[in-house]
Amino acid sequence: MVEVSASILNVLPGKETETFLALEKGKTDYFHIDVMDGVFVEKNTYDKMLEAASYIKRISNLPLDVHLMVKNVPEAVDDFGALAPNLITFHYEACSSPEEVMKVIQQIKGWHAKVGISVKPDTDVTKIYPFLPYVHTVLIMTVEPGKGGQTFLSDMTQKIQKCHSYIQENDLEIDIEVDGGINLKTADTVKAAGANILVAGTAILKAVDFGEIIKELKKS
């Protein structure tokens, strides 16, 4: 089953409430929270996303899918873990050693959240294979993290296929989430490669009918 995680990164100021409720009505499976610190990536959305995620928890029962694009992962895990998200994903590249990666995994589990590990486009996906038995989700970036509305990097399809094959061969129960440039054209490509959670922001928010595009993205 394919699920959709709607990115709220580019929700228009002043339109938050109606947009969040429309996304829920449109049957998005998750609200995708893009947390950036201005260090790990250029943009800084940290306080904005903390405020938005807190607000969503008050008005909606839909789960939060928190994507940490930050250098200080432990601090961010505690800040967003307190909001009881369904999933917290951190970047492999933000950790300096395998031991640090494992510490973060255990920290996230301490908040009773599912664990996701993400890789940037330039990172060899095999680097995260040792950690896959301990996580619930792999998030493969199909654009360089840090900006919304970027164009899908088509060579990331092979990375998705490679990861999917490894997961199947090792009988692991792990979701493959993809984030970056996902729309009705690129969705079919990543789904065929093995992705089952699609992060979409611009494609949904620019649509006339959120429900219609979300339904199309979910088609397997």
Image (cartoon, rainbow, N blue to C red):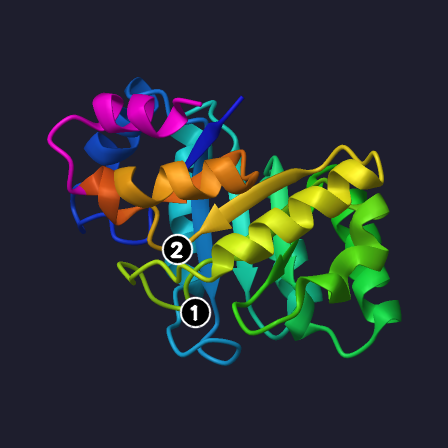
Rounded to the nearest whole Å, what is the CA distance between mark 1 and mark 2?
8 Å
Query: Does residue 24 sit above or below 197 in this rendering?
Result: above
| Residue at the extreme left of the image, as rendered | 208
**In the image, residue 115 lies in the stretch drawn in magenta:** no
The residue segment tinted magenta is 206-220
Q: Amino acid at mark 1?
A: Glu
| The N terminus lies in quadrant | top right
Residue 80 can be seen in this image: no
Q: Confirm or deny contact between disc 1 and disc 2 (CB under 8 A).
A: yes
Residue 100 can be seen in this image: yes
Front in this rendered view, residue 198 or 95: 198
Q: Amino acid at mark 2?
A: Gly
Crowd rating for badge 2 (residues with CA inside 10 Å; few <14, some 14–19, many 20+): many
Give residue 127's position: percent from left, percent from top: 75, 67
**Which residue is under mark 1?**
144
| SS at circle 2 | loop
| SS at circle 1 | loop
Question: Which residue is pictured at 41% across the width and 25% down the height?
Answer: 60
Give residue 23's position: percent from left, percent from top: 30, 28
Query: Does residue 175 sit above or below 120 in this rendering?
Result: above
**Which residue is under mark 2?**
180
Specify whether 133 is left or right of 45.
right
